[in-house]
Amino acid sequence: MTQISTEPESIEPQPEDAKTVARLAVRNSLWVTIGSYANQVLGFVAILVLTRLLNPDIFGFFSLGTFWFSLLNIRTKVGVNYAAIQQRELDGRLLGTFFTLDALTAGAGFLLSLIAALVFPLLGYAPQVSLALVALMTADSITSATGPLAMALEKEMQLSRVSFASVLGSLLGYGAALGLALGGAGLWSLLAINFLTAIVGMASSYIIVRRRMPLTLTMHWQFDRTLAKRLISQGLATGLSLTALGTIVNQFDNFLVGTFVSPTTLGYYDRAYRIAHWPNLLLTVTMSRIAFLTFSKVRDDMRRLTHAVRLAIWAVTTFGIPIVLILLFGATDIVSILYGSRWAESAHFLRYLTIYSVTWPVVSIAVWLSISEGKSRITVGLTLSQAVIIVLAATPLTLAFGATGTVIGVVITMISSFIAANIVIFREVPLSLREVYLAPFIAGIVALATNGVFNALTAALSIEPLVRLTTIAIISAGVFWLVLFIIRPTESIERVKFLASRFRKNT
């Protein structure tokens, strides 16, 4: 006799009140932040050693290959993942349709990478660039095997265990990279990181889903053409927008330096670029994942949406500005301590590239706000305008002045992006520039001036780089937070209490 299962074939969305959403957001923010910080610490240590073991041109080849990988990766451009997360029900139709689309786009991207690898020698690229492109695309493509599971975990905000798994992947990846570098593997030392993190990510997605969301594995996965069209139509604008941000805005400068200057110069530039993105990695990566999920849940409640946006900007300015000041005034010391004297040229680029740290977290908030509200025109307009500006500004400047011209083009693009992002934010939610930026602006100016006085007084003194950098860090963070508290003591205390209460409470 056939038994009829009474178990539901979909995971129904549950109603969530303000406290529940806040608690989910804060708890996931905490775990994602811890995971992100742990990954960055592991990365900093590993790359520190790798930088001393590998030549600058190796990093140049890898960076140029990464640019082409991002440009030719079809999966990210379709944006199906973001559209799937916004669907109300997690059922077999969604999982099966997502899996089919994800696998097809992964295969298309891999085919494009093979074609490009054959063409690159005709464009004058070194064989290492082709190798990096194909290897990176291969590592990314195999993750489509468990793509639906990873999407399901993110949709249901099961991020704490995913964050732990990403740390494990980083441990294995960086450990293998160091071993290969010591063995003289060169470029493969960097490529191994992507392969191992991809494999660990696939395995962890399956294990976590099996333990936390077993129903997902027992559902009947099926492809639905109507749903596929809807996912593509909803996700395409997001995918193209993020491609414009991630590939053109964030990496086009690497392409210019690596193509029109030299891979070695790109190696120096890339190290400075990575340091300048510390606030982006520590703040924006967390904000990107949590802000999208949180904004999506409260998008129909303007009061809660406004509060979420203001909290996001508060976090970015409160923790991001001190980091920016440390990078700006400690550029020479940071490069000297981390990479050694042979990388001194990176410090020159770092001072200018700090502009990324100031603007990019705010740009990220604007992008995810528009995406969560389903306003694709705003998203596309915001991102594509940045892509156009950097191409039109940085290309002729690079041809005329080399890498210095590239940096000038980046500064122009980032200032324009910051202005455009704030226009989007303040049109979408009832906030004002004064209530959001006045206090951190004043605190930042005071900390900036204090650092300037310190530099002037100690310019003729011989101070150890580590001592100088530590002093700059204390001044940057201490003065900034002290002034911020003096200006807005009540708000500062309330924000800390709010975050603590949302993490503790179960409802």
Image: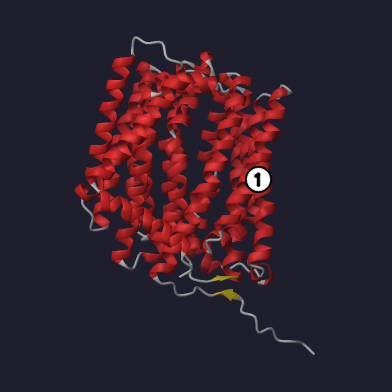
* Residue located at (52% from left, 69% from top): 226
Q: Where in the figure is residue 237, as x and y percent of width and height?
A: 41, 53
What residue occupies the far right of the structure in this picture?
A: 1
User: Does the rendering let one see residue 259?
Assistant: no
Vertically, is 384 above or below 191?
A: below
**Above or below for 341 versus 326:** above
Picture quarter containing residue 386?
Answer: top left
In this rendered view, identify the residue nearer to me: 206 or 322: 322
Q: Is residue 387 left or right of residue 108?
A: left
Q: Is residue 358 above or below residue 467?
A: below
Q: Where 41 falls versus 260 (above or below)?
A: below
Crowd class of label 1 (few under 14; some 14 to 19; many from 20; radius 10 Å): some
Q: Quadrant of the rendered structure where residue 461 is?
A: top left
Residue 460 or residue 359, whichever sits in front: 460
Quadrant of the snapshot with the N terminus: bottom right
Q: Residue at x 68, y 34 (%)?
A: 175
The residue beneath circle 1 is 168
Q: Position of residue 440 (x, y in %)?
A: 27, 41
User: Which residue: 29% across, 31% down?
Assistant: 447
Residue type for callout 1: Leu
